[in-house]
Image (cartoon, helix red, strand yellow):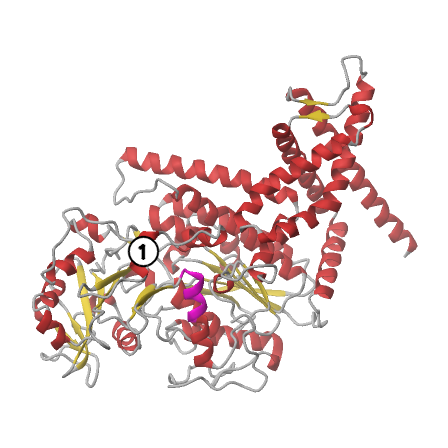
Amino acid sequence: MVRRRWRSAGSALLRVVTVWAVSTLTMLVLAGILPDFQLRADDTDSITQVALTAVWGAGAFGLLGALVWPLAVRALLLVPALVVGVLAFFLNGSLLLVALSLIPDGRGEADPETAVVVAAVMSAVASATSGALAVRDDDAYRRRLSRLAHRRGRRGGDDGRHGLPGTLFLQLDGVGHDVLLQAVSDGLMPTVASWLGGDEPTHRLTPWRTDWSSQTAASQLGILHGSNHDIPAFRWYEKEGREVVVSSRPAGAALMQRRAIARTGDGGLLTFDGASRGNLFSGGADQLALVLSIAARRGKSNRSRAGYFAYFSDPANAVRTAMSFAAEVVREIGQSTRARLRGDGPRVKRGGLYPFIRAFATVVQRDIVVAAVLGDMLAGRTAVYADLVAYDEVAHHSGPHSTDALKVLERLDRSLELIAKVAEHAPRAYRIVLLSDHGQSPGETFQSAYGLTLANLVRAGCGLPVPRRAARTTSASEARDAVRTALHRPVPDDEEEQEHPEPGTDPVVLASGNLGLISFPDVAGRATREQIDRHHPALLTTLANHPGIGFLLLRSEEHGALVLGADGAELRLDGDGESGDGRTGDTGPLAAFGAGAADAVRRTSGFPHVADIMVNSWHDPETGRVHAFEEQIGSHGGLGGEQARPFLMSPYTLSAPVSDGRELAGAEQVHRVLRRWLRECQGPQVPMMVGESAEDWRPEPEAEGPFPVSDGAVQDKSA
């Protein structure tokens, strides 16, 4: 035992000396390259004096970094989150200037701008050297992880239950089932391929069907909180408050989470020792980072900001992420330029701030979420749910099957590989579940195909004046809103007007991918077909017969929920579910949208805040193409194509998601499957929902009020 301790101490001392030596050498090289960085008092200094100066400066810089950096970054938590990364460079440079001032005889000197560069390079080199030495020494690496896990476990109130496996849910945002298979087949995702293939595959792949609103807010709310009732789209209009709820705004996400908790009577999937990372909702977790539903909070109590401190507490992280961020901006500019020169189509504008928004989603958000997940595993958390949004953001602008988007999956696979390797050193075993919330469907935008927006088509059908120049439809972007939230930026005036429309006779028209919502603010309650025909006799015919529209959903005083298609086709969703000519959902206006479309539309029709008219775009069942009502050539939000077919990939050590060839349909059913898996791993401590067991996965019929839960269900602490 004594010999082992001495060996451990000797290895640690050797690593410190090696990192110090490499830092010293780096400082000498930079002093020789940069004219404004000096390590000598005058030209008479010998090489030995210069080397000793570098040794002193590197040591002082390393010591200051270890002592001052964590405290300084924690103090910066009150600063807008993305600004932390920028200030980190100046803080690092300031520490170097202090270190140089401590060198005897004033031999260290650097301009402030040069100090920032030198400090960044030295931090990156020192971090890389330290990490390489730790990884090469496997015993040291294990001890390091164990110590970190033990220390974090004490801080987090570790209950010592590390003998049971934990569960890690990793969401690849927007990755459809077929896209995942394509990436695996093309060799872009070797980590996923190793889980699915080989002599002994460890995971099974199961497709599932989304609700009509095939977008992150509806899917993730259902998955994490067990209910996505009354979420008709990405954004929708509520007449009683005369406002538009946007799911990517902190206020909107918080409202949706509160309503889900009130309906289910349960805090969420992660209420028992859980962590929520990079999600729209908390899932009831105590440990939160980059969670939108609590992002509106201010001050040190905002636990969503803690993820930035955990990541930027290492100065090398700031350097590495900043370099990757810049590289991603250049990559996007190059890719969009080549696409424009080649004349690729369909295509949308990718200029302005978009390269920086893309870099945030594919670099900053990815790095922070992955780092948080690694910390959760080292701390031995019971359940972790994390969302990686990189692919979804790129696919919106480049297309879901584009080389640009598939290359993002290649980089995400490397993150999965890192997570899997660290899981081997975690203080408890982890079962990794990979899933997506929806897919994406390709296609030319509605405006590009027909020369006008859905809003202008509605105005024409209502007999209202149509602007000669079509205004651009505001496009849904979770990454853009995340950047705005991180910077504490207000909503722009044009979007604010759309979210709080003034009372009047003009209809409110909103877009959610290839799903459109039309509401008449001056009609109390949900407008009926008869009311619409009386006030706007040409509107329904104009919409239903437009070649870019697949079907309409509205309510009839006589027939209840009603689907309208082209050439007078109708489908009654209430009662016998048939149209006047006997056609059902399999052969009527919903036939092109596949099995389950009628059930999904019928369910949405019963939501309190469903729009007066719900519009689903045209869909080509052979190619899977749709027409987005936003500026997106890869879209999701409605029915049609791959957007409604995400995946669920689970270890064989967990029970099968479904049995007897049943289809896994709807995010609420996915929630019940994930909750069952948590029970299989952890026993009865995880709250159950009604009818939920390893033998019986079938969901209970939707209740009018909250779902009953077992005793001990933990209410969400962040709502």
The quadrant where residue 682 appears: bottom right
User: Would you say 689 lies left or right of 175 here?
Assistant: right
Q: What secondary structure do most residues of the magenta stretch adopt?
A: helix
Start-end of magenta stretch: 248-256
The quadrant where residue 25 appears: top right
Residue 205 position (above or below residue 340): below
Q: Given the current orientation, which residue lies at the most extreme right position?
A: 2
Give the mark count: 1
The quadrant where residue 323 appears: top right
Q: Position of residue 606 (x, y in %)?
A: 28, 79
Name the foreground residue: 285 vs 194.
285
Callout 1: 10 Å neighbours few (<14), some, many (20+)? many
Q: Report the residue at 59% width, 42% height from top.
A: 87
The image quadrant where one finds the N terminus is: bottom right
Q: Which residue is mark 1?
A: 635
Q: Given the current orientation, which residue lies at the most extreme front position?
A: 503
Q: Position of residue 495 (x, y in %)?
A: 32, 55
> SS class of the residue under badge 1?
strand
Residue 679 visible? The answer is: yes
Q: Report the residue at 50% width, 72% height from top.
A: 674
Q: Report the residue at 51% width, 74% height from top.
A: 268
Residue 84 position (above or below residue 24): below
Residue 526 position (above or below residue 480): below
User: Would you say 519 lies left or right of 335 here?
Assistant: left
Name the foreground residue: 567 vs 31.
31
User: Would you say 299 lies left or right of 96 here?
Assistant: left
